[in-house]
Image: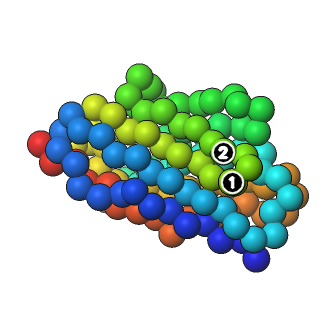
Amino acid sequence: QVQLVESGGGLAQAGGSLRLSCAASGNIFSINVMGWYRQAPGKQRELVASITNGGRINYADSVKGRFTISRDNAKNTVYLQMNSLKPEDTAVYYCHIDPSYGPDYWGQGTQVTVSS
């Protein structure tokens, strides 16, 4: 059994910052890819950022230069530092992991709301 525990969401003003964390625990040998997705009301879930075990990073164009993803492999934790937040960043943010073996997993989601 694998659990993902997300934290750090909440309310921020436009131009502000928030930091999301997602800690994976349970029967995990290693994790290939860790990432963050988001889903705004009425929209499809979209990739925000991902990071591989080797440190390769991918960002959505809409967050490049504002968001930074990082991971601590010893703690099986992935972070998302979100700066210069915009109202259009408002969404439920989901942590996602792709372990080396077995199925992938999703977190329960954390709400991020940015006011103008």
Depth check, front residue: 52 or 77: 77
Outermost residue toward the bottom?
1
Depth check, front residue: 24 or 59: 24
The residue that appears at 34% across and 46% down in the rendered structure is: 18
With 85 as the anchor, is 109 left or right in this view?
Answer: right
Depth check, front residue: 40 or 20: 20
Q: In this view, does 25 lie above or below 33?
A: below
Quadrant containing the C terminus in the rendered view: top left
Can residue 28 be seen at all in this image of the molecule? yes
Q: In which quarter of the image is residue 33?
A: top right
With 100 as the anchor, is 4 left or right in this view?
Answer: left
The residue that appears at 68% across and 54% down in the rendered structure is: 75
In the drawing, what numbered circle is on residue 72?
2
Pinpoint residue 21: horizontal percent, then vertical percent. 50, 53
Q: How is the image coloured?
A: rainbow
Pinpoint residue 95: horizontal percent, then vertical percent. 55, 56
In the drawing, what numbered circle is on residue 75?
1
Can residue 45 be seen at all in this image of the molecule? no
Q: In this view, does 33 lie above or below 56?
A: below
Quadrant containing the N terminus in the rendered view: bottom right
Outermost residue toward the front?
74
Pinpoint residue 39: horizontal percent, then vertical percent. 41, 55
Identity, as a three-letter code, of the amino acid under mark 1: Lys
Disc 2 to disc 1: CB gap under 8 Å: yes
The residue that appears at 75% across and 71% down in the rendered structure is: 26
Pinpoint residue 24: horizontal percent, then vertical percent. 66, 62
